[in-house]
């Protein structure tokens, strides 16, 4: 079978690229290739967002699938608001999706995973990065089981394909051919025709959308919470020192 010609190609920095093809009528496949592991750099995000804008404004409404040209990684690490457009978004995770890479996949409407390769993991607890409100809320809203959310956030569990399917993190297993079959069976290409698809999604995920729309306010509140935490820790330390002093106790070195 001859290769599918590209609708357009966007650069990702100086070494990467994002290629858009059309494997089926009104089905747009975005394949990103940003070595070594499709990290969500500013250049990556800008190209990804531009591709979504091009499809939104220059092509008939349909369905968008994102995947990776790097076999091992979907993404190892968005400005997520662009996935609230009037289009169905489908993530085909061909390899590992960690941290921000998994967040990007969760912002899609549907997710498929390679049944033979890759893990899904939210591992911020392992490298000391807090989850900002919109980052956390998308998992809280979309995961069907709160215990899965707890395991993902507090234990950094690596989910293989079968576990991801069982826990409702993904909707199915397979690669692009299986995704296309699912799209056809579910008649997803035509869902955007009525023009309300974006509004429906915006209301479905109101909590996450609210955090994104008030991102600056969320950042200010997060900063204030950090300062309040520091003050509380200082007060707690003072109370322990006061408790030790009259009784001649020494703080434990454990």
Image (cartoon, rainbow, N blue to C red):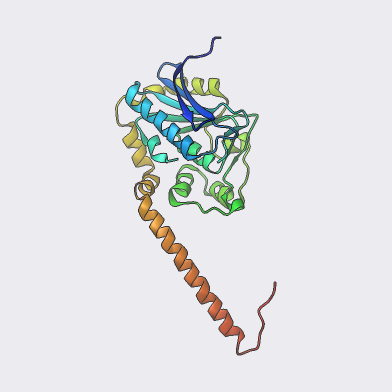
Task: Give residue 226's position: percent from left, percent from top.
Answer: 47, 63
**Residue 31 shows in the view:** no
Q: Note whether 141 is above or below 53 in the view shown.
A: below
Confirm whether residue 214 shows in the render.
yes
The residue that appears at 33% across and 23% down in the rendered structure is 58
> Between residues 38 and 233, which one lies in front from this camera angle?
38
* Rendering quarter of residue 24: top left
Query: Which residue occupies 58% across, 82% down?
Result: 241
In the foreground, 69 or 10 = 10
Residue placed at 43% from the left, 35% from the top? 46
Quadrant housing the C terminus = bottom right
Where is the N terminus found, in terms of image quarters?
Answer: top right
Q: Position of residue 204 (x, y in %)?
A: 37, 41
Farthest bottom residue in view: 246
Farthest-out residue, left: 195
Q: Nearer the viewer, residue 107 or 230?
A: 230
Q: Is residue 177 above or below residue 230?
A: above
Tally the numbered discs: 0
**Picture coordinates of residue 125 (x, y %)?**
58, 53
Which image quadrant for residue 128?
bottom right
Image location of residue 174, percent across then percent down: 58, 26
Residue 158, quarter of the rendered image? top right
Please, which residue is most extreme toward the front here?
14
Q: Residue furthest top?
A: 1
Check the image and report above or below for 89 versus 131.
above
């Amino acid at each position: 079978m001859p290769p599918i010609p590209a609708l357009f190609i966007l650069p990702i920095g100086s070494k990467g690229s994002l290629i858009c093809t059309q494997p089926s009528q009104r089905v747009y496949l975005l394949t990103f290739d940003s070595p070594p592991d499709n990290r969500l750099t500013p250049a990556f995000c800008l190209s990804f967002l531009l591709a979504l804008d091009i499809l939104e404004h220059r092509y008939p409404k349909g369905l968008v699938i994102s995947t990776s040209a790097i076999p091992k990684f979907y993404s190892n690490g968005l400005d997520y608001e662009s996935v609230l457009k009037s289009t169905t978004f489908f993530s085909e995770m061909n390899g590992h999706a960690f941290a921000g890479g998994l967040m990007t996949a969760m912002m899609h409407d549907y997710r498929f995973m390679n049944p033979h390769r890759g893990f899904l993991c939210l591992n911020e607890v392992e490298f000391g990065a807090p989850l900002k409100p919109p980052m956390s809320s998308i998992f809280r809203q979309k995961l069907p089981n709160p215990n899965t959310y707890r395991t993902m956030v507090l234990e950094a569990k690596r989910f293989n394909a079968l576990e991801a399917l069982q826990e409702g993190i993904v909707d199915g297993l397979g690669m692009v051919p299986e995704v296309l079959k699912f799209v056809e069976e579910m008649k997803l290409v035509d869902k955007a025709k009525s023009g309300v698809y974006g509004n429906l999604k915006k209301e479905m995920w109101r909590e996450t959308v609210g955090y994104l729309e008030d991102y600056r306010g969320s950042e200010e509140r997060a900063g204030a919470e950090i300062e309040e935490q520091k003050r509380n820790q200082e007060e707690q330390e003072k109370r322990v020192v006061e408790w030790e002093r009259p009784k001649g106790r020494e703080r434990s070195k454990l």
